[in-house]
Amino acid sequence: MLMWSMPEGTRAISTGVVGGGINPCRWVVNVRVEYEYHRDPVEHLTGLAADWHLAGPGTGLLTAARLKDFTTGTDGDAECVTTVGLTHPVYAAAPDHSAEWAPGTINTVCWVPVGLSDAALVNTVVTATEAKTQAMIDAGIAGTGTPSDAIVVCCPQDGDEPYGGPRSQWGQRLANAVYQATFAGSVQWLRKAQ
Protein backbone atom coordinates (compact mmCIF):
# COMPACT_ATOMS: atom_id res chain seq x y z
CA MET A 1 0.00 0.00 0.00
CA LEU A 2 1.08 3.55 -0.70
CA MET A 3 -0.38 6.14 1.68
CA TRP A 4 -0.25 9.90 1.83
CA SER A 5 -1.34 11.98 4.82
CA MET A 6 -2.56 15.37 3.69
CA PRO A 7 -2.33 18.55 5.74
CA GLU A 8 -5.46 19.96 7.32
CA GLY A 9 -7.25 22.13 4.78
CA THR A 10 -6.54 19.96 1.73
CA ARG A 11 -9.11 19.12 -0.90
CA ALA A 12 -8.93 16.76 -3.84
CA ILE A 13 -10.56 15.86 -7.08
CA SER A 14 -10.54 12.10 -7.40
CA THR A 15 -11.84 9.31 -9.57
CA GLY A 16 -11.19 6.87 -6.71
CA VAL A 17 -13.81 4.24 -5.86
CA VAL A 18 -13.83 5.71 -2.35
CA GLY A 19 -13.86 9.49 -1.96
CA GLY A 20 -14.42 10.24 -5.63
CA GLY A 21 -15.46 13.74 -6.70
CA ILE A 22 -14.30 17.05 -5.25
CA ASN A 23 -14.03 16.73 -1.48
CA PRO A 24 -11.92 17.62 1.54
CA CYS A 25 -9.07 15.11 1.77
CA ARG A 26 -6.91 14.05 4.73
CA TRP A 27 -5.49 10.87 3.19
CA VAL A 28 -4.96 9.03 -0.09
CA VAL A 29 -4.24 5.31 -0.41
CA ASN A 30 -3.21 3.24 -3.41
CA VAL A 31 -3.78 -0.41 -2.53
CA ARG A 32 -2.42 -3.42 -4.39
CA VAL A 33 -4.90 -6.18 -5.15
CA GLU A 34 -4.49 -9.51 -6.87
CA TYR A 35 -4.83 -9.75 -10.63
CA GLU A 36 -8.03 -11.79 -10.16
CA TYR A 37 -9.73 -9.32 -7.79
CA HIS A 38 -13.40 -10.06 -7.09
CA ARG A 39 -14.24 -8.16 -3.88
CA ASP A 40 -16.54 -5.19 -3.42
CA PRO A 41 -14.01 -2.35 -3.82
CA VAL A 42 -15.91 0.20 -1.73
CA GLU A 43 -16.37 -2.22 1.15
CA HIS A 44 -12.75 -3.37 0.88
CA LEU A 45 -11.22 0.14 0.88
CA THR A 46 -13.57 1.42 3.58
CA GLY A 47 -12.60 -1.53 5.77
CA LEU A 48 -8.89 -0.96 5.17
CA ALA A 49 -9.23 2.74 6.02
CA ALA A 50 -10.89 1.80 9.30
CA ASP A 51 -8.23 -0.86 10.04
CA TRP A 52 -5.48 1.70 9.40
CA HIS A 53 -7.24 4.34 11.56
CA LEU A 54 -7.37 6.85 8.73
CA ALA A 55 -9.31 9.77 10.16
CA GLY A 56 -11.48 12.15 8.20
CA PRO A 57 -12.32 12.15 4.53
CA GLY A 58 -9.97 10.59 2.03
CA THR A 59 -9.81 8.74 -1.23
CA GLY A 60 -8.72 5.25 -2.22
CA LEU A 61 -7.42 3.64 -5.39
CA LEU A 62 -6.83 0.00 -6.31
CA THR A 63 -4.23 -1.52 -8.61
CA ALA A 64 -2.71 -4.86 -9.53
CA ALA A 65 0.54 -3.06 -10.41
CA ARG A 66 3.59 -3.58 -8.22
CA LEU A 67 3.54 -0.70 -5.77
CA LYS A 68 7.27 -0.88 -5.13
CA ASP A 69 7.74 0.15 -8.76
CA PHE A 70 6.06 3.54 -8.25
CA THR A 71 7.61 6.42 -10.16
CA THR A 72 7.68 10.13 -9.42
CA GLY A 73 7.86 13.44 -11.21
CA THR A 74 8.22 17.02 -10.03
CA ASP A 75 8.26 20.48 -11.50
CA GLY A 76 8.61 23.32 -9.05
CA ASP A 77 6.38 22.29 -6.16
CA ALA A 78 3.97 20.27 -8.34
CA GLU A 79 4.44 16.58 -7.63
CA CYS A 80 3.19 13.31 -9.07
CA VAL A 81 3.45 9.66 -8.06
CA THR A 82 2.27 6.94 -10.44
CA THR A 83 1.91 3.20 -10.38
CA VAL A 84 1.89 1.85 -13.91
CA GLY A 85 0.36 -1.42 -15.07
CA LEU A 86 0.06 -1.78 -18.84
CA THR A 87 -1.30 -5.29 -19.21
CA HIS A 88 -4.18 -3.99 -21.31
CA PRO A 89 -3.67 -0.51 -22.80
CA VAL A 90 -6.63 0.81 -24.77
CA TYR A 91 -7.58 3.76 -26.92
CA ALA A 92 -10.42 5.72 -25.31
CA ALA A 93 -12.31 6.16 -28.60
CA ALA A 94 -12.26 2.59 -29.86
CA PRO A 95 -14.81 -0.14 -30.54
CA ASP A 96 -16.24 -1.85 -27.47
CA HIS A 97 -14.03 -4.78 -26.57
CA SER A 98 -15.34 -5.24 -23.03
CA ALA A 99 -15.27 -9.01 -23.45
CA GLU A 100 -11.49 -8.71 -23.85
CA TRP A 101 -11.05 -6.67 -20.64
CA ALA A 102 -8.06 -7.46 -18.46
CA PRO A 103 -6.59 -5.55 -15.53
CA GLY A 104 -4.06 -2.86 -16.20
CA THR A 105 -4.06 0.41 -14.31
CA ILE A 106 -2.20 3.68 -14.22
CA ASN A 107 -2.93 5.36 -10.89
CA THR A 108 -1.82 8.97 -10.69
CA VAL A 109 -1.62 10.90 -7.40
CA CYS A 110 -0.71 14.59 -7.63
CA TRP A 111 -0.08 17.59 -5.42
CA VAL A 112 -0.37 21.22 -6.52
CA PRO A 113 0.72 23.66 -3.78
CA VAL A 114 -1.82 26.41 -4.52
CA GLY A 115 -5.57 26.53 -3.95
CA LEU A 116 -7.46 25.96 -7.19
CA SER A 117 -10.98 27.00 -8.15
CA ASP A 118 -13.37 24.13 -8.89
CA ALA A 119 -12.99 24.77 -12.62
CA ALA A 120 -9.19 24.79 -12.38
CA LEU A 121 -9.25 21.59 -10.33
CA VAL A 122 -11.35 19.87 -13.01
CA ASN A 123 -9.01 21.27 -15.66
CA THR A 124 -5.99 19.71 -13.91
CA VAL A 125 -7.53 16.28 -14.48
CA VAL A 126 -7.74 17.00 -18.21
CA THR A 127 -4.19 18.37 -18.26
CA ALA A 128 -2.79 15.43 -16.28
CA THR A 129 -4.60 12.94 -18.53
CA GLU A 130 -3.19 14.61 -21.64
CA ALA A 131 0.31 14.44 -20.14
CA LYS A 132 -0.19 10.77 -19.23
CA THR A 133 -1.23 9.99 -22.80
CA GLN A 134 1.71 11.95 -24.24
CA ALA A 135 4.09 9.96 -22.03
CA MET A 136 2.53 6.66 -23.11
CA ILE A 137 2.89 7.56 -26.78
CA ASP A 138 6.49 8.68 -26.29
CA ALA A 139 7.23 5.38 -24.49
CA GLY A 140 5.85 3.44 -27.47
CA ILE A 141 2.59 2.28 -25.88
CA ALA A 142 -0.30 1.76 -28.29
CA GLY A 143 -3.10 3.31 -26.25
CA THR A 144 -4.30 6.41 -24.43
CA GLY A 145 -4.67 4.71 -21.04
CA THR A 146 -6.11 1.55 -19.53
CA PRO A 147 -9.73 0.63 -18.74
CA SER A 148 -9.28 1.32 -15.02
CA ASP A 149 -6.97 4.34 -14.72
CA ALA A 150 -7.58 6.62 -11.75
CA ILE A 151 -6.34 10.05 -10.73
CA VAL A 152 -6.23 12.20 -7.61
CA VAL A 153 -5.15 15.84 -7.63
CA CYS A 154 -4.79 17.42 -4.18
CA CYS A 155 -4.34 21.10 -3.34
CA PRO A 156 -4.89 23.49 -0.43
CA GLN A 157 -8.52 24.53 0.13
CA ASP A 158 -7.57 28.19 0.50
CA GLY A 159 -7.01 30.06 -2.71
CA ASP A 160 -8.79 30.46 -6.00
CA GLU A 161 -6.24 29.99 -8.79
CA PRO A 162 -8.50 30.19 -11.86
CA TYR A 163 -6.66 27.97 -14.36
CA GLY A 164 -5.29 24.43 -14.52
CA GLY A 165 -4.71 24.02 -18.26
CA PRO A 166 -1.38 23.08 -19.84
CA ARG A 167 -0.31 26.69 -20.42
CA SER A 168 -1.26 27.95 -16.97
CA GLN A 169 1.57 28.15 -14.43
CA TRP A 170 0.42 25.25 -12.26
CA GLY A 171 -1.19 23.21 -15.02
CA GLN A 172 2.07 23.23 -16.97
CA ARG A 173 4.07 22.22 -13.90
CA LEU A 174 1.59 19.46 -13.12
CA ALA A 175 1.73 18.24 -16.74
CA ASN A 176 5.52 18.04 -16.59
CA ALA A 177 5.42 16.09 -13.31
CA VAL A 178 2.79 13.66 -14.63
CA TYR A 179 4.70 13.19 -17.88
CA GLN A 180 7.95 12.41 -16.03
CA ALA A 181 6.31 9.89 -13.70
CA THR A 182 4.22 8.18 -16.38
CA PHE A 183 7.04 7.98 -18.92
CA ALA A 184 9.42 6.50 -16.34
CA GLY A 185 6.76 4.05 -15.15
CA SER A 186 5.85 3.00 -18.70
CA VAL A 187 9.47 2.39 -19.70
CA GLN A 188 10.08 0.46 -16.48
CA TRP A 189 6.95 -1.67 -17.02
CA LEU A 190 7.94 -2.46 -20.63
CA ARG A 191 11.46 -3.44 -19.58
CA LYS A 192 10.17 -5.81 -16.88
CA ALA A 193 7.52 -7.30 -19.20
CA GLN A 194 10.15 -8.52 -21.69
Image: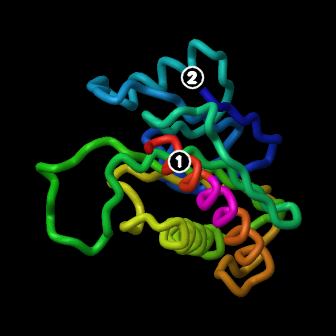
Q: Judge whether residue 20 can be spotted in this image.
A: yes
- Is the image coloured rainbow, by chain, by secondary structure, or in one colour? rainbow
- Residue toward you, 11 or 105: 105
* The quarter of the displayed image where residue 96 is located: bottom left
Residue drawn at point x = 74 percent, y = 57 percent: 73
10 Å crowding of disc 2: few (<14), some (14-19), many (20+): many
Residue 44, percent across and down?
41, 22
Outermost residue on the front side: it is 194
Residue 112, percent across and down?
77, 61
Q: Where is the N terminus found, in terms of image quarters? A: top right
Residue 3, percent across and down?
67, 31
Question: Which residue in the structure is indicated by mark 2?
Answer: 49
Outermost residue on the top side: it is 51
Relative to residue 107, is residue 54 drawn left or right?
A: right
Residue 49, percent across and down?
57, 22
Q: Where is the C terminus found, in terms of image quarters? A: top left
- Decide which of tag 2 and tag 1 comes sooner along the chain: 2
Relative to residue 143, is residue 181 drawn left or right?
A: right
Question: Which residue in the structure is indicated by mark 1?
Answer: 191
- Three-letter amino acid code of the residue under disc 1: Arg
Specify whether residue 136 is painted magenta: no
- Three-letter amino acid code of the residue under disc 2: Ala
Q: Which mark is residue 62?
A: none
Magenta-highlighted residues: 178-184
Image mark count: 2
Residue drawn at point x = 37 percent, y = 67 percent: 142
Element under label 2? helix
Secondary structure mostly taken by the magenta-highlighted segment of the chain: helix
- Say which of marks 2 and 1 sits in front: 1
Specify whether residue 180 is painted magenta: yes
